Amino acid sequence: MKIHPCLFLLLLGSKAVLAQSQTGQSWLDGEYLTGDWQGKRTELKESGVTVFGYYNAIAAANVSGGVESDSSYAGDLFVGMHVDLEKILGWDDTVLNLSAIDRHGRSIDSAVGGRYSVMQLVGGQNAFLYEVNLEKKFLDETLSIKLGRLSATDDFVGSPYYSYSLNNAVNGQIRAVLFDGVMTSYPFPVWGGRVKYQPNEEFYVTVGAYQLSDDIFDRNDQGVDLRIDGEDGVSIFTQVGWSPQIAEKPANFFVGANNAFYDMEKFNSTGTTNHFLRLYAHGDYQVYQESPGSEEGLVVFATFAYTRQEDVAIIPIQSTVGLNYQGLFPGREKDRTLLYTTFGKFSGDFSREEVAAGRGATDYEMVVELGHRFELTQFAYIQPDLQYIIHPGGTGDIDNALVAGVQFGVTF
């Protein structure tokens, strides 16, 4: 009998409660749903093996507008380990990363009719072997190199603030950078590597190269298709980041570029191009701080993605502006309250192709999202959420949609 991941986690949690009560420790004050395994987790970490596991899920319903009413559930199970090869084999500053993913459920995207997914956990609904890579640090840990099976979203175009969104317009990465099949993404691993140089806490520069192929997003490959074909392309990312203190409050900025060398078909044409360039940027700043040095307060962030190649880019211009407040309500210092707005402009060439195919002309799509994440414990959260999709699909033929949802997750 197959056990659903949610039930499996509940069983693990129940076992952990009994184990922790026997040692007199408080389970609710711990970091993990399954506790410390009566000290075995700590022993493993001290010996060089750090195990991890996360389960996140979304239940959502299209309650108004869109194409039709619908509701659904989707989940994502992510497990793995980091193996310290210095402790185990004596290889200085070297870590082996191994992980696997199981995605299940479906989205209500077809009922909403938008281009951006309202349930960011949907995409590649299957079990995957994900990370199999080595990371080694040099020069007093200021330089690190990672090689093997991985994806660009592990190291590029991301911010912790994106993870609070249920809409994939910005969750994980700035979505426009991924739309055109030239950025590799979780949960689909490819061959690749990246080099990161970080001489201090404020500055870094990262360069990465990743395999591109026609079937990199084929969920049936399950991460075990290790082929490199002659017609495969390469996606090269360059990103520079700066994290200063401005008026004694933290800020983070990064700018980057993706150069993809890959044969891409042009919209509404028989022509192709073998080079694609996308530029992107992010900035965030804690504009209000409840007390000096406190994480509690209001952070404002903004993103921008642009390419001039409208003949191959679905959304050449995208921008998100977000507000993220930690500890808005008294007694809830770890909670997060968010208000995010994303604007995506469809390319004229893509619109003409849609018209030629008998569909409506596309212009723009906007997403407004309001949510509050309750941090129930160190290992569990729940986040009620509302999304308002303006101009779904960009045609103006679909009514604006209101999506109500809830995301929850545990670290086990």
Image: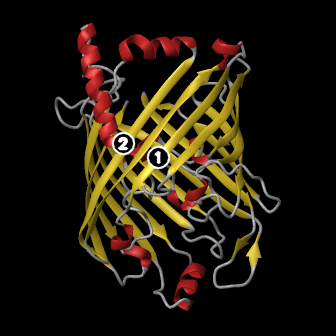
Q: Which residue is mark 1?
A: 102
Q: Which residue is mark 2?
A: 5
Instruction: Specify which label sits upstream in the sequence, 2 or 1.
Output: 2
Q: Write the residue at 38% across / 74% down.
A: 113
Q: Find numbered disc 1 in the image and state the secondary structure of the residue it sits on.
A: strand
Q: Nearer the viewer, residue 25 or 362?
A: 25
In-image side of 192 versus 17 (left or right)? right
**Quadrant in the picture for residue 381:** top left
Amino acid carrying label 2: it is: Pro
Indicate the position of residue 409 as horizontal and vertical percent values.
33, 40
Q: Is any atom of residue 226 visible in this view?
A: yes
Q: Residue furthest top?
A: 23
Q: Find numbered disc 2 in the image and state the secondary structure of the residue it sits on.
A: helix
Indicate the position of residue 264 as horizontal and vertical percent values.
71, 70
In-image side of 360 versus 12 (left or right)? right
In-image side of 383 versus 361 (left or right)? left
Q: Is any atom of residue 289 visible in this view?
A: no
User: Quick one: label 2, few (<14), some, or many (20+) residues within 10 Å?
Assistant: some
Badge count: 2
Quadrant containing the N terminus is: top left
- Where is 199 relative to 240, above or below? above
User: Quick one: label 1, few (<14), some, or many (20+) residues within 10 Å?
Assistant: many
- Where is 42 relative to 101, above or below? above
Quadrant containing the C terminus is: top left
